[in-house]
Image (tube, rainbow, N blue to C red):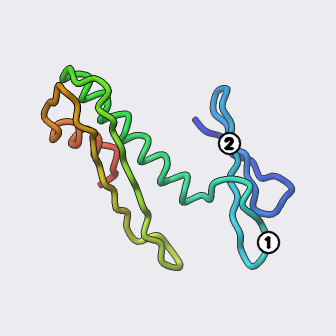
Amino acid sequence: MVEAAALTEPWQVVYRTGGHAGLADTVKEGAGGSAGMRPHELLEASLATCMTISARMALADLGVADAGVSVRVHLEREEPATRSATSSFSTRRSKRTGPRSRSASRARRCVPR
């Protein structure tokens, strides 16, 4: 569970889970700032993180160590709401390569349908 609470600075929010905490911030009509990640960036980060960890776990199950997994997520934002998300997945070649499709498939389980 993650808890979030508004701070006194316009649009700043602290979020916490367990022993970890972060700061989110945004700008609207000249108020706010860039003291932390913006809310949609947090969504992109959580999805990219889930996909990366899932792919690394799948590759480890296949015996592929240090595959250099990289994921990039970008939310297409149109006012007034986010319309779509795109992601890309890549691994760095290693001496022991396994089926890339299995790790990509597991990583894509993080994407809601």
Q: Of the numbered discs in the image, which one, if any, rests on residue 39?
A: none
Question: Residue 45: horizontal and vertical position, in percent?
Answer: 49, 49
* Badge 2 element: strand
The one of 27 and 7 positioned closer to us in this rendering:
27
Q: Residues within 10 Å of mark 2 (few under 14, many from 20)?
A: few
Q: Residue furthest front?
A: 95
* Badge 1 element: strand
Quadrant of image for the N terminus? top right
Residue at image point 70% right, 58% down: 25
Residue at image point 40% right, 40% down: 50
Quadrant of the rendered image containing residue 9 = bottom right
Going by the image, does 59 lie left or right of 42? left
Question: Residue 106: horizontal and vertical position, in percent?
Answer: 25, 38
Residue at image point 28% right, 23% down: 65
Quadrant of the rendered image containing residue 28 = bottom right
First of labels 1, 2 by sequence position: 2
Task: Tell me which amino acid carries mark 2.
Answer: Gly
What residue would you read off at disc 1?
A: 31
The one of 73 and 70 positioned closer to us in this rendering:
70
The one of 74 and 17 positioned closer to us in this rendering:
74
Going by the image, does 31 lie left or right of 101? right
Task: Tell me which amino acid carries mark 1.
Answer: Ala
Q: Of the numbered discs in the image, which one, if any, rests on residue 22?
A: 2
Question: Residue 110: horizontal and vertical position, in percent?
Answer: 34, 44
Q: How far apart are marks 1 and 2 (CA)?
A: 20 Å
Question: Residue 78: horizontal and vertical position, in percent?
Answer: 48, 77
Asked if 78 appears above or below 73 in the picture, the reply is: below
Quadrant of image for the C terminus? bottom left
Q: Cβ–Cβ below 8 Å for labels 1 and 2? A: no
Q: Residue furthest left?
A: 99
Residue at image point 44% right, 41% down: 49
